Amino acid sequence: MVSTGESAPNISATVANGEVEAFELDDHLDDGPVVLAFFPGAFTPPCSNEMVALQDHLGDFHDAGATVLGLSADSAFSLNAFREEHDLGFSLLSDMDRDAIQDYGLEIDIEELGLLGVANRAVFVVDDEGDVAYDWVADDPTNEPDYAELVEAAESA
């Protein structure tokens, strides 16, 4: 699992930002810190709650110069519908091949929901050098991060 102080693995994924386009994390590091919020699945209550909470703090993240990105194994088309339903002002990344989920060591199964090989809930703040400045990984995928702590990590990155 990726930890604070380590180099963040690059992410090659499909971005759902209202459109559907290719995305490379390395291309966005010069823009300031990146907050990567991995989540198990769109349209599930805990994931909806987390993404809405990140949206509620989006102004604070922007004030810190940070870009917020959600990431799951859902399709970009599902993620665009999820963004629209919750009026999210940040992009979501589709990792259907699960490369990023595996690179970050976050792959889990939630068998009772039929979610196999999905991302555990986790948040990483990646600084403009490409290093992990902050990491939080849920011990239970229904848990949510401390959002004030995330904002502080983005401000410090």
Image (tube, grey):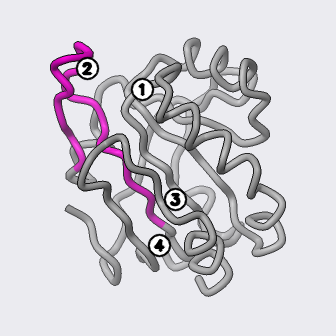
Q: Report the front residue among 139 and 84.
A: 139
Check disc 1: other Cα within 10 Å, few if <14, some if 14-19, many if 20+.
many
Viewer-side label of 1, 4: 1
Instruction: Answer whether labels 4 and 2 touch (C-beta < 8 Å).
Output: no
Q: Secondary structure at mark 1?
A: loop
The range drawn in magenta is: 106-124
For marks 1 and 4 on the same chain, the one whose residue lies earlier in the sequence: 1
- Height in image: 146 above or below 12? below
Residue bearing mark 4: 130
Instruction: Answer whether labels 3 and 2 touch (C-beta < 8 Å).
Output: no
Q: Secondary structure at mark 2?
A: strand
For marks 3 and 2 on the same chain, the one whose residue lies earlier in the sequence: 3
Residue bearing mark 3: 26
Instruction: Answer whether labels 2 and 1 touch (C-beta < 8 Å).
Output: yes
| Mark 2 → mark 1, Cα distance in angstroms | 8 Å
Q: Secondary structure at mark 4?
A: loop
Main SS, magenta region, reads: strand
The quadrant the N terminus occupies is bottom left
Check disc 2: other Cα within 10 Å, few if <14, some if 14-19, many if 20+.
some
As for residue 118 lying within the magenta part, the answer is yes
Residue bearing mark 1: 41
Q: Label 3 sits on what residue type?
A: Asp
- Height in image: 143 above or below 20? below
